[in-house]
């Protein structure tokens, strides 16, 4: 049996034993029991984030072949575990490994950009990543529009650049006419116009309220 697995199982057994001993000491005292359960909940939370999630990611993402071939790990699950731990650069590195193994994937690119923009608060880096990968190869229609829509989302959510977002959406409509992508772009364009109008009204209201 794997040594790491034995250690983990031993720690779990020890943790259960400590819970049982602790409960025997605090039961009957409501105040101590409450403190006991809060402490156990906190410890369990730490265990889940720092041990259970990575372990679960490795377990689910690993495919073992009976012929003894090298195991393969799902980098996406490992990235999710890193993200849950707050290791954002580590999560990006896992997505980059997935891209290196299969550069035709668009999802890891979008995830890297999302982490940069939302977690690292670096939308400029996110925009550079999306544009770089979009220009790096000839993408299938679905992947190309997927990445272009992510750029639109970034322009609106982080740069508040309605003109740039509108230009991108109009480009999707022109490049993929009579498709669900152009329909989605038109719908997004309507939402953009409403958001832009709301922004203008709010700005005017603020300006009018100034002395």
Image: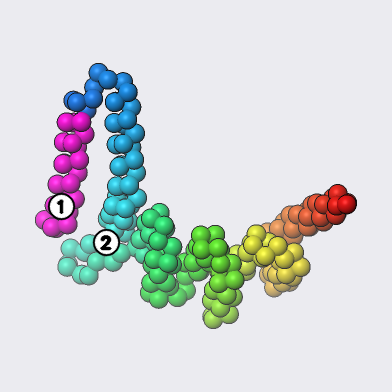
Are discs 1 and 2 less than 8 Å apart at CB? Answer: no
Looking at the magenta stretch, what is its main secondary structure? helix
> Does residue 12 show up magenta in the picture?
yes
Per the rendered image, the range of residues in magenta is: 1-22
Task: Reply above or below: 14 against 99.
Answer: above
Q: Which residue is mark 1?
A: 7
Residue 137: percent from the left, percent from the top?
54, 80
Q: Which residue is mark 2?
A: 63
Q: CA distance from mark 1 to mark 2?
A: 22 Å
Rendered residue at 62%/67% (across/down) = 151
Is residue 142 visible to the viewer in this orientation of the structure?
no
Q: Earlier in the sequence, mark 1 or mark 2?
A: 1
In which quadrant of the rendered view does residue 178 lie? Answer: bottom right
**Could you tell me residue 133's position as x and y percent?**
54, 76
Q: Quadrant of residue 84?
A: bottom left
The residue carrying pointer 1 sits among few (fewer than 14), some (14 to 19) or many (20 or more) residues within 10 Å by Cα, namely few
Kindly identify which numbered label has been placed on residue 129: none
**Where residue 126 sits in the image (x, y, percent)?**
56, 69
Q: Secondary structure at mark 1?
A: helix
């Amino acid at each position: 049996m794997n040594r790491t697995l034995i250690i983990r199982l031993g720690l779990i057994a020890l943790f259960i034993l400590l819970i049982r001993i602790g409960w025997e000491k605090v039961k009957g005292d409501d105040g101590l029991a409450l403190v006991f359960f809060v402490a156990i909940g906190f410890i369990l939370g730490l265990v889940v984030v720092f041990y259970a999630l990575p372990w679960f990611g490795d377990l689910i993402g690993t495919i073992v072949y009976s012929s003894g071939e090298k195991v393969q790990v799902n980098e996406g699950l490992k990235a999710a575990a890193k993200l849950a731990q707050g290791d954002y650069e580590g999560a990006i590195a896992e997505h980059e490994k997935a891209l290196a193994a299969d550069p035709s994937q668009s999802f890891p690119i979008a995830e890297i950009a999302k982490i940069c923009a939302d977690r690292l608060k670096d939308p400029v880096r996110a925009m550079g990543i999306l544009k770089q990968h979009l220009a790096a190869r000839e993408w299938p229609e679905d992947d190309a529009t997927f990445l272009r829509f992510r750029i639109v989302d970034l322009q609106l959510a982080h740069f508040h650049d309605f003109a740039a977002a509108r230009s991108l959406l109009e480009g999707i409509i022109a490049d993929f006419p009579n498709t669900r992508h152009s329909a989605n772009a038109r719908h997004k364009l309507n939402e953009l116009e409403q958001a832009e109008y709301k922004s203008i009204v709010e700005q005017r209201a603020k300006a009018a309220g100034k002395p």
